[in-house]
Image (tube, rainbow, N blue to C red):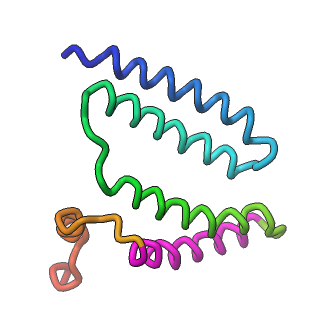
């Protein structure tokens, strides 16, 4: 109880950020601009809620942003420069994402031991499936 006002504030601010960035970025960057505007919605909400509730920002947030930047830097040239069928482009993007995600996580190591253990418990193990 009593948490409605910060949530409303975060919702309104993130929606305004989305609309402004969508108008500014969609024309020059097309789908990439729309994706950036959507990502900024989450960042604005996250920031406002963290400040409103007096929480500290997780230590690995910077590393997670670095992983996202590596993925974006890999996918953006494909999106902007490759002029081909939308299905071929999407297939290439999925392939590059599947290759670069483990590479980025291996290089940056944004997860701590506890988070890795939690992820392992959520992913079904091959020997348990048989």
Residue 96 on the magenta segment: yes
Q: Is residue 130 above or below residue 58?
A: below
Image coordinates of residue 100 in percent, x first then y, are: 52, 75
Image coordinates of residue 95 in percent, x first then y, are: 58, 76
Assign the N terminus to one quadrant of the image: top left
Image coordinates of residue 99 in percent, x first then y, are: 52, 79
Name the residue: 63% across, 65% down: 73
Horizontally, residue 42 falls left or right of residue 16, namely left
Comparing 122 with 104, the one in front is 104
Horizontally, residue 109 falls left or right of residue 56, namely right
Horizontally, residue 5 falls left or right of residue 21, namely left
Q: Residue furthest right?
A: 83
Comparing 9 with 82, the one in front is 9
Name the residue: 66% across, 35% down: 21
Name the residue: 79% across, 69% down: 82
Where does the magenta region start and end?
86-107
Residue 32 on the magenta segment: no
Name the residue: 31% across, 24% down: 52
């Amino acid at each position: 109880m009593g948490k409605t006002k910060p949530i409303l504030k975060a919702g309104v601010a993130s929606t305004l950020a989305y609309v402004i960035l969508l108008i500014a970025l969609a024309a020059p960057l097309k789908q990439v601009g729309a994706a950036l505007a959507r990502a900024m919605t989450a960042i604005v909400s996250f920031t406002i809620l963290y400040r409103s509730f007096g929480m500290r920002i997780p230590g690995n947030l910077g590393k997670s942003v670095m992983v996202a930047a590596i993925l974006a830097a890999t996918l953006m040239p494909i999106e902007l420069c490759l002029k081909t069928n939308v299905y071929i482009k999407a297939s290439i993007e999925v392939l590059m994402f599947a290759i670069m995600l483990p590479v980025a996580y291996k290089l940056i190591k944004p997860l701590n031991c506890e988070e890795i253990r939690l992820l392992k418990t959520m992913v079904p193990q091959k020997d348990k499936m048989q």
